[in-house]
Structure formats: structure tokens, C-alpha cells
Image (cartoon, rainbow, N blue to C red):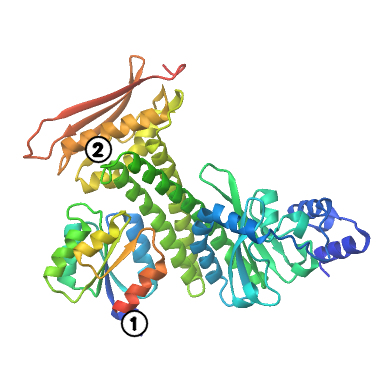
Amino acid sequence: MSSVQEAWRRYVSIGALDERLLRPSVYRAWERSHLGGASPRQMRAEQVGAAELELLLADEHHLIEAGRPYMRSLSRAAGTYQHAAMLGDARAIVLDVVGDEQSVNGPESVPGPGSLLDEAACGSNGIGTPLAEGGFTELEGPEHFIGGFHAFTCLGVPLHGPDGEVTGALSVSVRSPAASRRLRDVMVCAAHGIEAELMRLRLERHITELLEANPGDEGGPFERLRQDVVQLSAAARVRLQSAVSLLERRPQDALRLLSQAQTAANAFRQRARFFRELASSEFGPPQPVSLTERVHEMMTLLATEASTRRVEVLTPPQLPPCTVHADPRRLGRALLQLFLDAFDVAEGGGALDVWVEARGGLGEVRLLARPAPGAVGELQERRLAFPLARGLQ
Amino acid sequence: MSFASECRILVADDDMELRGALVDCLLAEGFQVLEAADGEQALKVALEQQPQVVLLDHRMPGILGAEVARQLKQHRLQTRIVLITAAREGAELAAQAGVDAFLRKPFELDSCLNILRESC
């Protein structure tokens, strides 16, 4: 008998929780389950009513929409093992389940949409425990507080919304510890994918609102930049789905693709955050902002715009650090306008030289736009300056 | 031999990240893959190599994807053209360009592979 089985037997027979027999995270989960009133013999079947569930699913449709493709990937990665990928909200209520027929609709199916899986009701589990722990959780067989779950290995991870708030949890339950090992990387990558997707969906809504408020801007820079940002989320999704299809045949290639998918999803999130700031109409108070970093971010964001407009963007090997006192959103907007104006001059084969420098109490971006050879137009210099942040002058 | 190994696909996208992702995936699936990084290159490679399918990004430097598609259609090749775009008016663009299929970014890899299976 393993130490975990022994711990469970002792708890069931005399109610003692033995810290020495359990991994620390599992011990904490059992303690919370015990204090919450969970029974190790059976789960407390707590289910939201049909009307409430309908409202809940409507409220959470963005999360469900974002999660579906990734849950399908997770399910596919589980292969022929009996399994279920589950999506829960921030309170550990199940929103969606994808898996084999037996696990989803069979006599011993996993809890379906509307089931409450917090630790007080269900003990340690793949949805409630990662939410309570605030991180990735793996529960193997008897590490589940409730005996009925001992046949499963469950992996779970909390999901974060675009502002970093916990918005739900993704989990997969599988009847094979060996299968769970190969699911771990897919699971973490899928969670990053869902978080990126949530950001994309919000970005799409935000830009739609922006365009509705400014009719006639449909083909404008914001719409074009949105398309460029979405490109990265598309790459992340293709790599993840491709990795899943290769897991069985070429596991090493699959792991490489998973890692690239994660990098793409993270790059997307970073770029989407910056883009959202640019598109926002809410301005804030001035604060210290790295002008150099903003210029770098802007050049990354505008890379496709520059290449489609055939503008070569040139910078010194290293731009000097320069921190200014400004509202980051106003600064971002002004910087975007500065670059787009310069692109107008250099479009069609010209070039743009970019400098950042601190001079006379000001941090300054300087763009020198050179028209394409033979094009009508003159060399133009454009500048944007902000006061240097205090203490850095 | 799988159907894929007989099938040549041109992936035309200026974005290295997405192009790389698609190329890696299609190679892993056993397809023969050609690449192009802009509209002119896509046109040139498609005319020279006459792949079975072109996966064509719309927003590319030089000639836009929809225009590449229009020009390829004029050559009456046996090549199927799939326009890929994140543009809101993607379906209209695809219809106007007369392409055979259209994928909106971000798309499901399965949707893309299904189109390729039907085309090869």
C-alpha cells in the first residue's frame, strides 16, 4: 500500500490527517476539503438549477468559446484512454466537458455542466484544487480526497483573464497515470492558448466598439494592426494543434512545437496588451514610462505594417535607455501617429531612421523619414518629446 | 504512401511565425511544402511550381493575397487557392477574388487539413 493510500485509509477510519504521508499541496487540499465538510466516501452532489445554469453559460460564453478548441486538443492528446477535459468557472462550477462517450455520458460519467467542484463539495479535484492553490495541480489516484475518484489522475490549472484575474480552471481527468504525463505539457500550453484567446476575443470586441464609434475607419490603422496581432494567436493555435497530432508519432517534435506554441501565445498576449492600450480611449495620470521600451514595442507592433507598406525601419544597434514622465496611453497614441505619419512619407521603398535620446530635460524620439528613391517628396524629420522622469534627468 | 506525400502545398505568408507554424505542421503531416514571403514571390512560385494548393495570406507586402489569387485564376491553373485572413470582410474578399476556400484567422488546424485532404 502506498503512503497516500495509507493516509486515505487512516483519514477514513479515524479522521486523522497525516502530513508526513502526503505531498504538501495534497495535504493542504485535504485539509481544506476536511474543513469545508467534504466526505471522503461520496461527493456532495451540488448542482446549479437549470435556469441558473442557462444564465451562467450565457455569462461565460466567451470563456467557453475560447476554451473549446483547446479542450478538443486536450481530449485528442489523451488518445484512446478514458478521459474528460473539463472547463470550470472561477467558483469551480463546470461549464463544459469534452471527452470519450463513456466519460461524458456513460454510467460513471464525470460531473457535467452546472456541477460544483469546489473542495468543500468534492474534495481535492482537478478544478477546485488548482483554483484554491492558485497554480498547476496534479492529483494521482488516491491523492483525491473522495474514494470514488481514485481511479483517475487529474491535472488542472487556473485560467487568467486579460487583466490577470482568475477566470476559471482547465482540467483533464484520465484513467492512466502514464497518459497523464504526456498530457501535462499539452495542458499548460492549452491554458496559455485559452488565456491568449480570451485576450483576442476582448480585443475584437474593443476594436468593434472603436470602429462603430468612428465609422469610416474600417480599413484604418487600428483594423490593420488588429489583423497583425491576431496573426500571432493563429500561429500559437496551429502549433498547439499540430503538436497534439504528433504526440503519439513524434513526441520530441511535439514537445518542440508545444514550446513554440507557448512562446507565440505569450508574445501575442504581450502585443495584444500593448495594442489594447493604444486603442483605449481612457487616459490616465502621467507616470514613469520607458520611452525606449515603448519605441521597441511600437516597432514590433508595426513590423507587418512597415513591410506591407515597403518601409525599411532602421535603428542604431542599441537604443539608449530613456524614461519619461507621461501617461503611457497618450504616449503610445502619439508614438503610433508619429510612426504612421513617417510611413506616409517613406511608403513604397523608403526608409525610416529611429533615434531615442535624452536632451535638456526631455526624452525625445526622432524619426527621419526618407522617401523611396525617385519618389516625389522630401526627407522629413519628426519628433516627439516628453519630460524626463524625475530623478532621471 | 499517404495522399499527403503526393501533394505539393505553397504556404504564402509574410509573417514568419504563422508561415513557420504551417510549414512545420504540413511537413509533419507528410506534405511537400513550398514557401513564399510576399505576394510577388507567391505568384512566381505558384506559376513555376504549380502546387495542388496555395494557402495564401491576404495582408502581404507588394501584392495583396486576393490580387495574387485573381492573377492566378487568370492563368487557369489546376491549383486550388485558399485565402487566409483576419480581415472582417474576409468572406467578401474571398468571394471577389474567386478563391476555392477561405479561412479566418485564427483557424482550426483541422479545417485547414480537411481542405487539403479534399484538394489532394
Considering only vertical position in the picture, is A36 above or below B22? above
Disc 2 on helix, strand or loop? strand
Mark 1: give few (<14), some (14-19) or many (20+) Cα within 10 Å. few
Q: Nearer the viewer, mark 2 or mark 1?
A: 1
In depth, the one of A302 and B33 nearer the eye is A302
Q: Is residue A60 visible?
A: no
Considering only vertical position in the picture, is A297 above or below A95? above
**Which chain letter matches label 1?**
B
In depth, the one of A359 and A138 nearer the eye is A138
Callout 2, which amino acid? Leu
- Residue at the image point whose x is 36% and y is 15% from the top: A361
Q: Position of residue A260 (x, y in %)?
A: 44, 57
Residue placed under numbered mark 1 in the picture: B3
Q: Position of residue A354 (x, y in %)?
A: 26, 32
Disc 1 on helix, strand or loop? loop
- Residue at the image point whose x is 19% and y is 63% from the top: B97
Callout 1, which amino acid? Phe
Q: Is residue A27 visible?
A: yes
Mark 2: give few (<14), some (14-19) or many (20+) Cα within 10 Å. some
Residue B74 lies left or right of residue A268; in this view the side is: left
- Judge if badges 2 and 1 mark residues of a common chain: no
Whole-angstrom CA distance, mark 2 to mark 1, is 46 Å
In depth, the one of B27 and A97 nearer the eye is A97
Q: Residue furthest front?
A: A51
Dividing the picture into quarters, in which one does residue A123 lie?
bottom right
Q: Position of residue A373 (x, y in %)?
A: 9, 40
Residue placed under numbered mark 2 in the picture: A314
**Which chain letter matches label 2?**
A
Considering only vertical position in the picture, is A336 above or below A228? above
- Residue at the image point whose x is 34% and y is 65% from the top: B23
The quarter of the rendered structure image containing the C terminus of chain B is bottom left
- Residue at the image point whose x is 79% and y is 57% from the top: A22
